[in-house]
Image: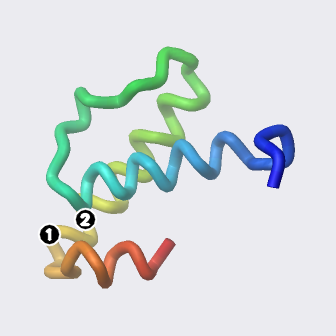
Amino acid sequence: MKTQKRDSQKRAFNHGYKAAIFGKSISSCPHEAETMRYQWTSGWREGRQDHWDGNAAIAGLHKL
C-alpha cells in the first residue's frame, strides 16, 4: 500500500498506543503538528489505561 493512501492520524494513534503499552513516556511523542500530537497522545492515553487494566503487551496489540 502506498504511503499516500494510509491515514496518518490513525497511524499516529496506533504508534501512541504501542508506546504506552511498552511503557514509554508521553513526552516521547515525536510529532510537532497539533493534530498529529493530539492523535498520538490520545492513543497513548488509551494504551496506558489498557496497560493499567492488566492487558499484556501482546493482548493490547491485538486491540489495534
Q: Is residue 63 above or below residue 28?
A: below
Residue positioned 40% across, 25% down in the render: 30
Instruction: Please name the colour scheme applied to the rendered image.
Output: rainbow
Residue furthest to the top in view is 32
Q: Which residue is mark 2?
A: 49
Q: Quadrant of residue 36?
A: top right
Residue 23 in picture, x, y percent from top left: 15, 52
**Residues under labels 2 and 1: Cα distance?**
5 Å
Residue furthest to the front in view is 1
Residue 28 in picture, x, y percent from top left: 26, 30
- Would residue 20 appear left or right of 64 to someone viewing this image? left
Say which amino acid is labelled 1.
Trp
Q: Circle 1 sits in a helix, a strand or a loop, which is it?
A: helix
- Would residue 44 appear left or right of 36 to someone viewing this image? left
Q: Quadrant of the N terminus?
A: bottom right
Residue positioned 25% across, 36% down in the render: 26
Mark 2 neighbour density, 10 Å: few (under 14) some (14–19) many (20 or more): some
Residue 64 in picture, x, y percent from top left: 50, 72
Q: Return the mark for residue 52.
A: 1
Mark 1 neighbour density, 10 Å: few (under 14) some (14–19) many (20 or more): few
Q: Return the mark for residue 24.
A: none
Say which amino acid is labelled 2.
Gln
Marks 2,1: beta carbons within 8 A: yes
Q: Circle 2 sits in a helix, a strand or a loop, which is it?
A: helix
Q: Report the number of discs.
A: 2
Q: Is residue 28 above or below residue 33?
A: below
Q: Is residue 21 above or below residue 11?
A: below
Residue positioned 46% across, 40% down in the render: 40
Residue positioned 85% across, 47% down in the render: 5
